[in-house]
Image (cartoon, helix red, strand yellow):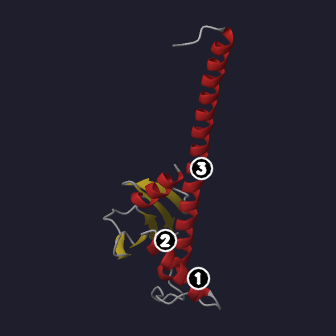
């Protein structure tokens, strides 16, 4: 039963246009927030790379160090990074000269990423996981990532 007066027809038209506008704004807002969320995941992964670099790069020509970086709060910062990675179920893989030399227990099976010419740090989606990759000048690769479930849980909460 649609009212036949002009006033009601105009109000229905305005209501439909308003609903369309609100829907478009909601979709636009979600897309922007999704981009920001993915950027925060990338920042988290790059932070993890920063804290794994002492294990990745040998100091003074010796083997990579398993000790945390030196400094008054460096040890606690490394522990915080490990806790954050565990909370997000994050993982890491280290490739030396094309061979997998170190990986976390929860790391998925992954082949060595192919270096992009001129790239040092990059982020990618791989098998549904979000990964950040650090390419060293010598060809070694440090990869950190979070599983797709972790990323989708954050996006579901946002939605």
Is the residue 152 above or below the residue 12 in the image? below
Residue 26: x and y in percent read 59, 39
Number of marks in the image?
3
Report whether 72 appears left or right of 93. Answer: right
From where the camera sits, is residue 116 visible? no
Q: Which numbered circle lies on residue 138?
A: 2
Mark 1 surroundings: few (<14), some (14-19) or many (≥20) residues within 10 A? some
Name the residue at 60% across, 86% down.
74
- Nearer to us of marks 2 and 3 is 3
How far, Cα to Cα, is label 3 from label 1? 28 Å
Mark 3 surroundings: few (<14), some (14-19) or many (≥20) residues within 10 A? some
Q: Nearer the viewer, residue 126 or 137?
A: 126
Helix, strand or loop at label 1? It is helix
Residue 125: x and y in percent read 44, 54
- Work out whether mark 2 precedes mark 3 in sequence or the reverse, and give the earlier one: 3
- Work out whether mark 3 precedes mark 1 in sequence or the reverse, and give the earlier one: 3
How far, Cα to Cα, is label 1 from label 2? 27 Å
How far, Cα to Cα, is label 2 from label 3? 37 Å
- Work out whether mark 1 precedes mark 2 in sequence or the reverse, and give the earlier one: 1
- Nearer to us of marks 3 and 1 is 3
Are the residues at dot 2 and dot 3 in contact (C-beta closer than 8 Å)? no
Q: Which numbered circle lies on residue 33?
A: 3
Helix, strand or loop at label 3? It is helix
Mark 2 surroundings: few (<14), some (14-19) or many (≥20) residues within 10 A? few
- Nearer to us of marks 1 and 2 is 1
Report whether 26 appears left or right of 125. Answer: right
Report whether 18 appears left or right of 57. Answer: right
Is the residue 41 above or below the residue 5 in the image? below
Name the residue at 49% across, 57% down.
154
From where the camera sits, is residue 82 visible? yes
**Residue under pointer 1:** 77
Residue 85: x and y in percent read 47, 73
């Amino acid at each position: 039963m649609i009212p036949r007066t002009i006033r009601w027809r105009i109000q229905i038209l305005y209501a439909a246009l308003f609903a369309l506008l609100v829907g478009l704004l909601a979709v636009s807002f979600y897309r922007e927030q999704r981009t920001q969320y993915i950027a925060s995941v990338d920042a988290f992964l790059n932070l993890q790379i920063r804290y794994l670099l002492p294990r990745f790069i040998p100091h003074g020509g010796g083997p990579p160090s398993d000790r945390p970086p030196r400094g008054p709060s460096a040890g606690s910062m490394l522990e915080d990074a490990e806790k954050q990675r565990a909370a997000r179920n994050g993982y890491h893989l280290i490739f030396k000269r094309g061979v997998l030399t170190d990986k976390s227990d929860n790391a998925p099976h992954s082949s060595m990423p192919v270096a992009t010419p001129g790239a040092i740090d990059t982020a990618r989606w791989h098998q549904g996981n979000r990964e950040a990759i650090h390419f060293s000048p010598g060809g070694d690769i440090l990869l950190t990532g979070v599983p797709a479930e972790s990323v989708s849980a954050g996006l579901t909460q946002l939605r």
